[in-house]
Image: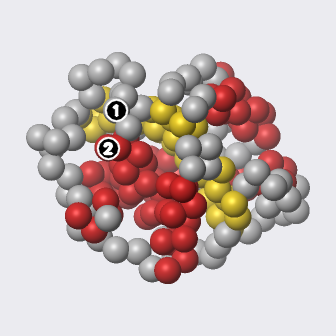
Amino acid sequence: AFFQEKLKTTVWGGAQKVLQAIARKPTARVAVKAGHGTQKTYSAARIALWFCWNWRPSKVITTAPTTRQVEKVLWTELRSAHAHLDKRAFPGRLLGLEWKSHDPNWFMLGFSSDNPVMAEGFHSDNILIIVDEAKGVPDFIYEGLEGALGGGNARLLLISTAGNPEGDFYDSFLDPEFETF
């Protein structure tokens, strides 16, 4: 409903299942492996806004293997979706790779995963972590992000095209805690 009413968009069946999986429980861990042009990043950006809209305060952390991927792909989609929101109901400023509200505990942040320190220290009762092109994110980044997922409403979304059969993204498809697509 948020996608249709607030963002004025719809998504196809497979993406709807991913949205439902991330929304279904407050400890959702969802991994998506799909080809190019299948609405992975499109949906992830809109999931970020859905989460931030519905849980106040909350933190949404987004990462990918490179700054270019975060800035030019995921955050370009986020900006496009953000343009449809009623700014009176969703106050704040979208700057670079950050959305800031009046509350320092209510924000969205994007960074590349080449620096392990950047992945640590995020804590909130309501947190969503999105990892785009997850196959290319080093395992030490996942370790840093894992500390943020100990709260009550702590969700994780991993999206990527297929890659080598190794690493944390690959392992998520073998982990029973993950709902996989």
- The x and y percentages for residue 157 are 60, 51
Position of 142 with respect to 81 (left or right) is right
Quarter holding the C terminus is bottom right
Residue 98 visible: no
* Amino acid type at image mark 2: Trp
> How dense is the environment of label 2, judged by Cα within 10 Å: few (below 14), some, or many (20 and up)?
some
Position of 18 with respect to 138 (left or right) is left
| Label 2 SS | helix
- The x and y percentages for residue 126 are 48, 33
Position of 29 with respect to 96 (left or right) is right
Q: Residue at x 20, y 52 (%)?
A: 85
> How dense is the environment of label 1, judged by Cα within 10 Å: few (below 14), some, or many (20 and up)?
some
Q: Residue at x 76, y 42 (%)?
A: 138
Q: Which mark is residue 56?
A: 1
Q: Which mark is residue 117?
A: none
Q: Based on the displayed image, in which of its 4 quarters is residue 96 positioned?
A: top left
Q: Nearer the viewer, residue 79 or 155?
A: 155
Q: Residue at x 70, y 46 (%)?
A: 137
Position of 41 with respect to 51 (left or right) is right
| Label 1 SS | loop
Q: Total number of numbered labels?
A: 2
Q: Nearer the viewer, residue 165 or 153?
A: 153
Callouts 2 and 1 close, C-beta under 8 Å:
yes
Residue 117 visible: yes
Q: CA distance from mark 2 to mark 1?
A: 7 Å
Q: Based on the displayed image, in which of its 4 quarters is residue 180 positioned?
A: bottom right
- The x and y percentages for residue 62 are 52, 42
* Amino acid type at image mark 1: Arg
Residue hosting label 2 = 53
Name the residue at the left extreme: 88
